[in-house]
Structures are given as structure tokens and as C-alpha cells.
């Protein structure tokens, strides 16, 4: 039986060109697998004519962190009422890169969560050959009420 997962664009508060997760593949309590398809169009917008381009490591990390956010939102009763803010990342190792036509697969695990923070670990790999391109020992996301950034909010 195929499990249905929501569209990442329906959970995260932004779309193209800031959304860097295309699909949630698997979700179990405390863990999520998501993919990002890297395209030539995307590389052109970031690298111009510097081909053969590779997806920048900063965007690979952003994509990984968005997968972490999706895990929090998948497990929240009030996903629409939460604002996620990246806090910090430690033990980040860039071990490779993916190019146009490749899928970047993120496997993220929730290590700890309370009312205000969530801590993750995980890795990202290229779907085709399974090579690990990014490892993150610890990433922390702050969880705030969605209206906390509204003008005049205390």
C-alpha cells in the first residue's frame, strides 16, 4: 500500500525559488526521507555559464534543513500555526555534490524536541549511486507561534 504524503509546498511557507524539497518519500515517527530534484535551470540561475555545475553546498544544506522542518510539521497537530526558524548546525560535512538530473535524498531523524526547539541529525545522498554528499551531526530549529513575527507582536 502506497502511503500519501503532503506536498512540501503546502507545509512550508514559501515556494519557488526558495523551496528546495520536492517530495516527501517516507515518514515514520521521528524520521523522514525527502528528495530534491536538481535541474539545469536551477544551476543556471545560481552559477550562470559555469558548467558543468554542481548544486551549491549551501543550498544542499538549506534543502536538508527544510526536510527537518517538514518532519516537525508532519508530526505537529497545528502545523499551520507554527513558524520554524533555523537556529544552528554543528558537525556539517560536505562530502560531495550532485549535478543536474540527480536526486538529492535527505534522511533526517528527530533527536529531541520540546515546545520551543527541535534537534535533528542526518545525511543526504545522491539517489543514483548512493554516495553521501552531506552529513549533519546536529541541527537545531526554533519553533514559534506563526503570528510571532507579525508587526506589533510582543
Image (cartoon, helix red, strand yellow):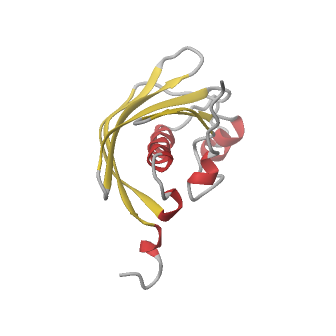
Say if residue 18 shows up in the picture: no
Q: Is residue 68 left or right of residue 104?
A: left
**Where 107 sits versus 14, above or below?**
above
Q: Is residue 65 left or right of residue 44?
A: left
Residue at 29%, 52% in the rendered image:
114
Residue at 57%, 31% in the rendered image:
54
**Where 73 sits versus 129, above or below?**
below
Q: Residue furthest top?
A: 129
Quarter of the figure with the N terminus = top right
Residue at 67%, 39% in the rendered image:
49
Q: Position of residue 7 (x, y in %)?
A: 64, 45
Say if residue 6 shows up in the picture: yes
Q: Position of residue 103 (x, y in %)?
A: 61, 28
**Where 123 sits versus 77, above or below?**
above
Residue at 66%, 27% in the rendered image:
2
Q: Position of residue 128 (x, y in %)?
A: 60, 17
Q: Position of residue 136 (x, y in %)?
A: 35, 34
Quarter of the figure with the C terminus = bottom left
Q: Which residue occupies the foreground of this view, 49 or 13?
A: 13
Q: Residue furthest bottom?
A: 152
Amino acid at each position: 500500500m502506497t502511503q500519501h504524503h503532503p506536498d512540501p509546498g503546502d507545509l512550508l511557507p514559501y515556494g519557488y525559488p526558495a523551496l528546495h524539497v520536492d517530495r516527501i518519500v517516507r515518514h515514520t515517527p521521528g524520521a523522514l526521507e525527502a528528495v530534491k530534484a536538481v535541474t539545469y535551470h536551477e544551476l543556471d540561475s545560481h552559477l550562470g555559464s559555469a558548467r558543468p555545475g554542481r548544486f551549491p553546498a549551501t543550498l544542499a544544506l538549506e534543502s536538508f534543513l527544510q526536510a527537518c522542518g517538514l518532519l516537525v510539521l508532519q508530526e505537529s497537530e497545528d502545523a499551520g500555526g507554527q513558524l520554524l526558524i533555523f537556529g544552528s548546525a554543528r558537525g556539517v560535512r560536505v562530502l560531495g555534490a550532485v549535478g543536474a538530473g540527480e536526486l538529492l535524498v535527505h534522511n533526517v531523524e528527530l533527536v529531541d524536541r520540546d515546545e520551543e526547539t527541535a534537534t535533528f541529525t542526518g545525511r543526504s545522498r545522491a539517489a543514483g549511486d548512493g554516495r553521501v554528499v552531506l552529513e549533519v551531526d546536529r541541527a537545531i530549529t526554533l519553533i514559534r507561534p506563526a503570528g510571532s513575527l507579525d508587526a506589533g507582536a510582543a
